[in-house]
Amino acid sequence: MGKYFGTDGIRGKANETLTAERAFVVGRYLGWYFSQNGKQKIVIGKDTRLSSEMLEAALAAGIAAEGCDAYLTGHCPTPMISYLVQNEDFACGAMISASHNPFYDNGIKIFSKEGIKMPSDVEDLIEEYIDGKVEIPYKTGEEIGKVVSYPEGLEAYLNWIEKSIAVDLTGMSLLVDCANGSASVSAKRALEALGATCTMLNDTPDGVNINTKCGSTHPEILQEKMKEGNYDLGLAFDGDADRMIMVNPEGNLITGDDVLYVSGKYFRDRGLLNNNKVVTTVMANLGLFKALEKEGIEIVSTQVGDKYVFDKMCEEEDIVGGEQSGHIIFKELEKTGDGLVTALMFLKMMKEEDKDAIALCEGLKIYPQLLVNVKVQDKDVAMNDADVKAAIEEVNQRLNGNGRLLVRPSGTEPLVRVMAEAETDEICAEEVGRVVNVVKEKYGVD
C-alpha cells in the first residue's frame, strides 16, 4: 500500500482526508498521464453518497484541465466501470465510492484499461504529484478536454448482464435490498428484464442513508422480511453493488463462503473447475475448508482483499474465487466482484440444479465465528510481541484442529483484529478473550 492508495484506492472522510482539491489533483494527473498520446477519454462513475457529486465534479475538472475528456455515467455500480473500460473506448476509469462505509466517507478507485486496479507504479506517480514532487503544466486552447454526460454507460452494462447470464427467472420472487446505493439504479431493471418479480427495499437514496442499517453489512431487516413473506431468495447489495449477501426463505444468511461452496461443486460437476481449485482468503470460514476438502476440491488462500484473490486466480488460471463478505469473482465473466453477477449466477445454479436456496447449500456447516477489533498504539509492535505470540500459540494448541484463531493487523486502521472459529459461540468468546486481554493490557488505547 502507498501513502494515499490502499488496497481499494484512495479512501477517507469527505473534505477531511479526501477533499475536492485532492480529487482535482488526482484528475489532473490522470488527464496529463493519458494525454501523452493525444486526447483520450476517461469514464467516471459514482455511488449515491452526498459527497460523490462534489468529488465527481472536481475529478472531471482536473481531467479536462489536462487534456482528456471526462465521461460521467452518473450513479452506477463499481463493476460497471470495470466493464466499460474493457469494452468501450476509454483509457481508464474511476469510481467514486467508499463501498460499504458510512455516507461521510468516500473514495476514488481507478481502473486500468484491462478492467483491474491501476498498477501500483502509476499510483506511485500520482502520489508523487499529490505531494508536489512533480509539476505539470495546464493544457490551453484547443487542448483542453470536455466533460460529457454519459448515461449510455448504464445501458451498455445492463445489456451485457442480460446477455451474459441469460437465465430465465420467470416465476421467481425476490426480495432485494439495494442499501440505498448504486444498486438502486441497476438491480430491479436487470432482474425484472430476466423475468423475476422483485419487491424492493432501501432503493430511495438521499445522499446520507447509503448503508445505514441496510444492505450487505446490515441484513437483519431483510432476514426478518424473508421469514414473513413468500420469496425464493433475498438479495442484499452493499453501497457500490460489488458485493452480494443473500438470505434463504428461512431467514438464514448465504455468505460468500456459501457461494464459493456451491460454485465449486457446480463447476466441478461440469468439468469446468480449472485445477479443481477455489480461491478465497484467510478469513473464509473453517467450515468451507472442511466441506470443500470432503468434496475433493482444493482451497487456495490469500490475504484479505479481492485484489489478492484475483491476482491468485490469474496466477493459477482458476475460474472462481472470492471473500466471505460476498465479493465473488467469476473470472470467465469479470475481473472484479459484481453483486448482480453473483446473484444471477446463484439463481442460475438454483435453476439448473432444480434446488431451492436451502437445498443448494446443504453440506456446508458454518462454524460459529467471533471477531474483535482492538485499538492499539502500534499494530506492528503488538503483532510481534512475545506475549501476544505466546497467547496465540496456546489458543491454537487448545483448539487442536477443531477450530482456529486468526490474528492480523488492519490494513487501514490502528487495529489488531482477533478472530476465532470453533464448535460453539462460547468457545469462540473464551479463546478470543484470552488474546484480546493480552493485547489490550500491553498496547490497547481507549
Image (spheres, rainbow, N blue to C red):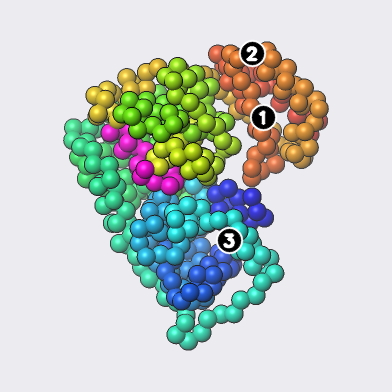
Residue 167 picture location, percent across and down: 23, 38
In-image side of 113 versus 231 (left or right): right
- Residue beneath the point at 55% across and 13% down: 423
In-image side of 166 versus 373 (left or right): left
Disc 1 to disc 3, how far (Cα)?
32 Å
* Label 3 SS: helix
Mark 1, residues whose alpha carbon is within 10 Å: few (<14), some, or many (≥20)?
many
Residues at discs 2 and 1 in contact (Cβ within 8 Å): no
In the rendered structure, which amino acid carries the disc numbered 3?
Val
Q: Is residue 179 above or below residue 364?
A: below
In the rendered structure, which amino acid carries the disc numbered 1?
Val
Check the image and name the residue furthest to the bottom.
141
| Quadrant in the rendering for residue 22 | bottom right
In-image side of 81 versus 355 (left or right): right
- Residue beneath the point at 55% across and 56% down: 119
Residue 377 picture location, percent across and down: 77, 40
- Decide which of 152, 38 is in the foreground and name it: 38
Q: Which residue is mark 2?
A: 400
| Region of the chain picked out in magenta, as a range | 332-348
Q: Which residue is mark 1?
A: 407
Q: Is residue 94 above or below residue 413?
A: below
Disc 2 to disc 1, how far (Cα)?
16 Å
- Which is more N-terminal, label 1 or label 2? 2
